[in-house]
Amino acid sequence: MLTIILIAVAAILLTIGLVWLIDKFLPSGLKPVIIIALWALIAFLGYQTFMSVYTPIQFNKIKNKRYALVIEKLIDIRDAQLAHKQVTGTFAGEFDHLIKFIDTAKYTITQRRDSTVLDEEMTKRYGGVESYKDIIIIDTLGFISVKDSLFKSSPRYKTMMNLPAGIGPEGAKFKLEAGTLEQNDVKIPVFESSVKKDVILYDQERDLVIQENQVIAVDGVNGDAIMVGSMNEVKTNGNWPKTYGDDE
C-alpha cells in the first residue's frame, strides 16, 4: 500500500510540474484545454491517494468491531462447552445438544472436608492398638442451574450458533466440532468452534480480506478464521489477542 501511495504522490507532483511547464511554454491557444485535463488528472490521482489510505482505515474499524462481537459469542460457546464437560465429561458436538444441556443441566455444589477415622486394618495388625487415618469427605450441599450460573436471565445462549446481527451473509453460523485426542493411551475430550474471516468480512474489499487471511502477528487474529478450542491439540483458548477479550 505504501508503494502505491508513493507512486500516486509522485504522479501528482509530476503532473503539477507539467501544468507549470505548459503554462510557461505552450502557446496560449492550447493552454486551457490541456491545463484543465491535467488538473482533472491531479484531482483523480489525489482522490485515489486519499482512498488508498482511507479504505484500509475504515476496513480495520469495521473488522475490529465485527471481531469483538464474534469473539463475545465464541466466549459464550466456550463457557457452555466447559460446563458441559464438567457435568458430563465430554464436549458437545452439536449446538442443539449444547442448548438443551444448558436448559436442563445442574452443577452439583460440594464441600470437601478433612476427617479422621479408625483404621480397622491397622488396628487389627497391631493387636487392637487403635490406629487412625486421615480421609477427605465430600458433602453434597445442593445444585445450581447451569443456565443461571452462566447466563442468568439472558436467553442469548439459544442463538449462540448464529453470527451476531449484521455480520456475515443471511443465516451465517459458527461451526462446532467435538471429539477426543489420544495422548499417552488416554482419550482426552476436545472441541472447536470457528467462523471464517471470509464470512465475517464478506462485504468488504476482497484484496483487504485476502491480506487479513494471511495475518501472522502478536496483536492480530492469525489465520483465516476466528476460533476457540482445537480439534488438533488439547486447548480451550481462542486464537485472538488479549485486546479483543479473554482468550483463556
Image (cartoon, helix red, strand yellow):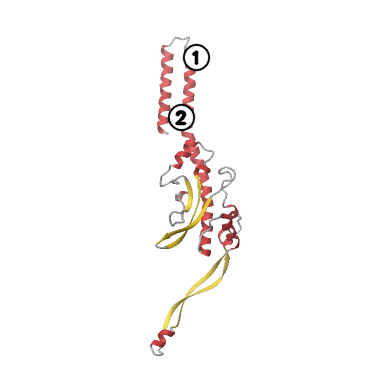
Residue 147 x %, y %: 58, 60
Q: Secondary structure at mark 2?
A: helix
Mark 2, residues whose alpha carbon is within 10 Å: few (<14), some, or many (≥20)? Answer: some
65 in relation to 81, above or below = above
Q: Looking at the image, how many numbered discs can be counted on the residues? A: 2
Q: Reply above or below: 69 against 143.
A: above
Q: CA distance from mark 1 to mark 2?
A: 24 Å
Q: Residue at x 42, y 24 (%)?
A: 11
Q: Residues within 10 Å of mark 1 (few under 14, many from 20)?
A: few
Outermost residue, front direction?
185
Residue 59 visible from this viewpoint:
yes
Instruction: Let me know if residue 245 appears in the view.
Output: no
**Mark nearer the N terminus (1 vs 2):** 1
Q: Quadrant of the N terminus?
A: top left
Say which of 50 and 201 sits in front.
201
- 80 up-or-down from 125: above or below: above
State the residue at coordinates (49%, 57%): 179
Residue furthest out toward the bottom? 127
Disc 1, SS: helix
- Tell me the tag on residue 49: 2
Q: Position of residue 119 (x, y in %)?
A: 43, 83
Q: Return the residue nearer the eye: 50 or 142.
A: 142
* Mark 2: amino acid: Thr
The x and y percentages for residue 63 are: 50, 42
Left or right of 149 on screen, residue 213: left
Q: Nearer the viewer, residue 238 or 229?
A: 229
7 left or right of 78 in image: left
* Residue 107 percent location from the top left of the image: 55, 66
Q: Residue at x 43, y 11 (%)?
A: 26
Residue holding disc 1: 33
Please state which amino acid type lies under the numbered disc 1.
Val
